[in-house]
Image (tube, helix red, strand yellow):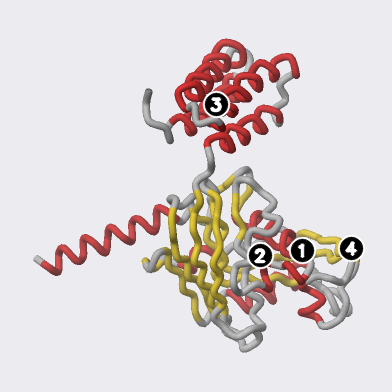
Amino acid sequence: MRTKVGLLIATAFTASVQAQVLPNDAVVGGKTIGEWTAECWKWIYSIPTNENPQLDCDGKWANNRQPDPTVFFIAPVTGVSPPPCTRTFTVPENRFILLPVLGITIDNIDTVPPLTLEELHDILNGVLDVPADLHASIDDQPVPNLLQHRATSPPFSFDFPDGDNPLTLFYQHPIIGLDDPVIADGYWLMLEPLSPGPHVLHTGGKVSIPFFLPHDLICNITVVPIALDQRVAELIAAVDGTNLPKNRQLPLVATLDAAKASFGSTNQRAGINQLRAFQNKLRAQIAPSDPTLAEQLFQAAQKILDTLPSM
């Protein structure tokens, strides 16, 4: 009986971890996981070395210049410093998390003549097809089937305005100007938004050739709840970003501004009523001509309402 109970518990934990990790063909915010890895590297390349999250092994720069409200980027380790790299930082609630297991890039810097895209991919495949090690866990529960989480970016480019960047450190001479093409590759996990509170993410791996040191990244994170007025502010930004004409945006934004003010003054009842009024306006004014947009905004408001006690 104890063996059966233990097996059931282990199976439940595995299912829970698998539910937190999106499948490798997932699309988040209109981008594939491979496309998100390119965005992650662009974020890393854009930040000076004295505040760069890839060069950070305590977590103080993990939130620096995070570029997207949908996905929170965790920078890969450099592979040139001895492991482990242990970071402690916060993540806003309701963010997907892009988590590196073993992430690298390739380009043609210092390569004469430059390699073709096919040749660059061949090198990446030789390094990554059969890694010597891959490991990942979420709150001490192992993530299975890591070989299924290979993510390769489309080719991208980055224009370095000056030499203060992590590639300058890697290549040991100033890297300035256009780097094109660049390909990101490796093993990455896209996590569903985690529940508020503390979590431990532990990932790493080792390529089969002794070029990089083993990657071993420990992230002690705290998912921080988003204040209600901030949630409404994000919804206002979403309405502002639609293609609705201003005369149709303004009544919606006015209602949301009132809800934001109510939540900011801790008047939850008024805030709830104003969000419901916003939903009613969507049904009456937007749904007849654009039902898809109306439903998207309706559900965004409902997501806020679902976090509140019914009144």
Q: Which residue is mark 2?
A: 61
Residue at 49% x, 26% y: name it. Answer: 267
Q: For the residues marked 2 and 3, what is the alpha-carbon distance in whole angstroms?
A: 33 Å
Q: Earlier in the sequence, mark 4 or mark 2?
A: 2
Image quarter of the C terminus? top left
* Vertical side of 18 occupied by 49: above or below: below
Q: Earlier in the sequence, mark 2 or mark 3?
A: 2
Q: For the residues marked 1 and 2, what is the alpha-carbon distance in whole angstroms?
A: 10 Å
* Vertical side of 245 occupied by 238: above or below: below
Q: Secondary structure at mark 1?
A: loop
- Residue 23 pos. (x, y %): 48, 54
Residue at 50% x, 31% y: name it. Answer: 266
The residue closer to the viewer here, 29 or 34, is: 29
Q: Which residue is mark 4?
A: 161
Question: Dot 3, crowdedness within 10 Å: few (<14), some or many (≥20)?
Answer: many
Circle 2: residue type = Trp
